[in-house]
Amino acid sequence: MKRTVDFIFSLILIIFLFPIIIITAIFVFIFIGKPIIFKQLRPGKNAEPFHVYKFRTMTNEKDSNGELLSDVERLNAHGKLIRKLSLDELPQLFNVLKGDLSLVGPRPLLMEYLPLYNSNQKRRHEVKPGITGWAQINGRNAISWNEKFKLDVWYVENQSLLLDFKILLLTVKKVFISEGISNGNHVTIEKFKGNKEIY
């Protein structure tokens, strides 16, 4: 049932939001540069890898040595606006349509984090990852990794279509108030370094 809901809703959203998707793509091309789409390998259900798609929000600016500048320096005002409105997430609707993602589930993190999880944290991969999730409506990037993983596992243990609809509605609210996008001095949450002794 969840896969059917994901397919139908993602298709409807792609059709409904298609003008916004095209406008965002043009905006990225003009103000941030090519490539328009950021593609990265992420772990899916059972930690199976897949490519997640997002609109780029950071430029390719480099220093005098040819090295990329820091994330903070490469995230210009245009990229911040795209993130604030969560427009960078729109290409993931095609991931949902393909079946890589669900509309709701634990967010797919980096492949490099897989060896760092403890046995309980690994449970977040028992379900398909999502565009939004229980952790996103309860703090997003403004909460600690430990809190995020607790919320992800809670979702795994309590998932239902009713809960998914609640999360989707609350996600819309979070987007409008732009809550939890950043964490301190980081443009996103700082990297997970492992905390096997916790939770």
Image (cartoon, rainbow, N blue to C red):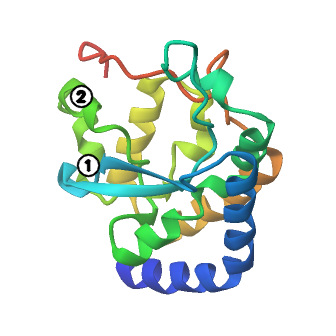
Q: Quadrant of the C terminus?
A: top left
When the figure is inspected, residue 90 is found, relative to residue 175, above or below; the finding is below
Q: Amino acid at mark 2?
A: Tyr
Say which of 135 and 23 sits in front. Answer: 23
Q: Quadrant of residue 188?
A: top right
Report the residue marked by disc 1: 125
Q: Position of residue 86 (x, y in %)?
A: 68, 52
Residue 117 numbered mark, or none? 2
Q: Is residue 178 rendered to the left or right of residue 146? A: right
Residue 117 lies, in percent from the top left, at 24, 28
For marks 1 and 2 on the same chain, the one whose residue lies earlier in the sequence: 2
Q: Residue at x 72, y 60 (%)?
A: 172
Specify whether 52 is left or right of 12.
left
Question: What amino acid is labelled 1 in the image?
Answer: His
x 33%, y 73%: residue: 99
* 119 horizontally vs 63: left or right: left
Q: What percent of the width, then of the height, locates residue 104?
A: 47, 61
Q: Secondary structure at mark 1?
A: helix
Would you place residue 14 above or below residue 160 in this image? below
Between residue 21 and residue 182, name the one nearer to us.
21
Task: Decide which of 138, 187 is in the foreground and name it.
Answer: 187
Left or right for 116, reference 60: left
Q: Residue at x 19, y 54 (%)?
A: 48
Q: Quadrant of the N terminus?
A: bottom left
- Looking at the rendered structure, the secondary structure element under dot 2 is loop
Q: Is 187 situated above or below 46?
A: above
